[in-house]
Image: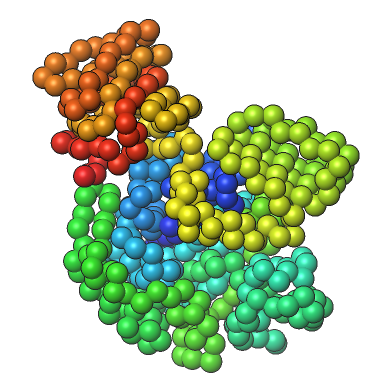
Amino acid sequence: MSISVQPVIMAGGSGTRLWPLSRAGYPKQFLVLSGDPADTRSLFQHAVARLQGLASADIQVAAPTIVGNEEHRFLVLDQLRELKVEPAAALLEPVGRNTAPAVTLAALAALDGGSDPVLVVTSADQTVTDAPAFTRAVQRAVRVAAGGAIVILGITPDRPETGYGYIKVAAGVADADAPAVARFVEKPDAATAERYLAEGGYFWNAGMFVLKASVWLAALERFRPDIASATRAAWAQRSTDAKFVRPGQAEFAAVPSESVDYAVMEQCPGSDFAIRMVALDAGWNDLGAWEAVWQVAPKDADGNASVGDAIVKDSHNTLVHATSRLVSAVGLDNVVVVETADAVLVASRERSQDVKLIVNQLGREQRGEQTLHRKVHRPWGWYDSIDNGPRHQVKRIMVKPGAALSLQMHHHRAEHWIVVSGTAEVTVGDKVVLLAENQSTYIPLGQTHRLANPGKVPLEIIEVQSGSYLGEDDIVRFEDTYGRS
């Protein structure tokens, strides 16, 4: 009899320590960070593909359940569509409540189907360089978890790392492939990390775990009944829209915020919930900061890693990530340089965790660079603000085949549209016209209008806005395919 596996991918993080490439509106899990020009898959897409690859003669793998937030819902579907993967469900959290409530939603969704599958839970922002080793380790964990145990993946350490929590396994156990977990320990200082590495029996906590849906709920009921009951209440008030499942907003906001580790995992050693560990030696990295990106990137003889149009001379152990223009560096040691169209980061590699200090200041100052790139992705395509001034703004806009913007109106600006490629269906007031390449139209201030792509290829236009106020909040929507107001 085969084991039923339900992959669960946690895709709700904001990735602040990888700013300016990662933004709240387009976080790191949806970015391509491999550094290999031939690898065009995002971290999220790699996570999906890895878990789909677990199927074997005795393991049956279901379509993935994605746990994320409302803002990223169309990014999730678009990236799954590129993989030709249809999700079991996309569970949309109205507010972030850490990982324990998120996994509880996934467990409740899995049990709703009438079965009790083994959940394989992973975050969407990790990298693995040895896919076959990953598959073997997780398959082993699945077989152990099918018997009722909680199984956590532990990374074999190769250095005295202070940025991760550790798992200590019990000594002298019979099952060397899945030893019992003796205890969890917090992120150590450098001397303690050195001791862990020398002693052996300590592994990095990768935050990946495998267990039956019913076992998770039973453990949560035991150790954090408040989270269990509050999440069940939110689940009972859920609404469903195609693959999108939304727990009750007010009820979910009342759920206590807690991580899986604190809520359950760290409580299990010594309890009647068996918790075991399977070692994972597969080139794993969580890409938590630019230092980690440098660690996994291909490097030259001097330890330099570069992405994009970069020239690096007389430098050592430096990362240069160029997005939109040539970036050149001379005489740098242990430095990170990250360029995007609207922001540049220069930091010491050893301080790369502190990029969050910049992001926090941007938040306090309510600057847009914290949340969005110059190029902003929308459900219908994207727009790139290529020029702006006191009373004008120029955007390049792409609309996907068959997609349409909302029927809308602006109080403070007029717009000119010029078609660059594709075919545009333009609604202005009660008139609808088709525009081909090099044709244009004018949208007067206060006039209802809509842009749509009736064709089979992407539509690109240049939009020139003029008026007294050009903010994105000057928009009144009358009809919208994507449920926005």
Report the side of 450 relative to 347 (left or right). Answer: left
Q: Quadrant of the C terminus?
A: top left
Judged from this view, the residue extending furthest toward the left is: 430
Image height of 239 relative to 264, above or below? above
Q: Is residue 42 visible?
A: yes
Q: Position of residue 131 (x, y in %)?
A: 62, 51
Report the side of 203 relative to 79 (left or right). Answer: right
Q: Quadrant of the N terminus?
A: bottom left
Examine the image and state in which quarter residue 223 appears. bottom left
Image height of 410 relative to 456, above or below? below
At horizontal 83% and vertical 49% (from top left) the residue drawn is 333
Which of 424 and 180 lies nearest the eye of the viewer?
424
Examine the image and state in which quarter residue 192 appears. bottom right
Q: Position of residue 32 (x, y in %)?
A: 57, 41
Q: Is residue 49 visible?
A: no
Which of 148 and 154 lies nearest the eye of the viewer?
154
Image height of 349 relative to 112, above or below? above
Q: Position of residue 4 (x, y in %)?
A: 39, 62
Q: Position of residue 432 (x, y in %)?
A: 17, 16
Say how many tags the image has.
0
At horizontal 74% and vertical 55% (from top left) the residue drawn is 349
Image height of 51 relative to 249, above or below? above
At horizontal 53% and vertical 83% (from top left) the residue drawn is 266
At horizontal 70% and vertical 44% (from top left) the residue drawn is 337
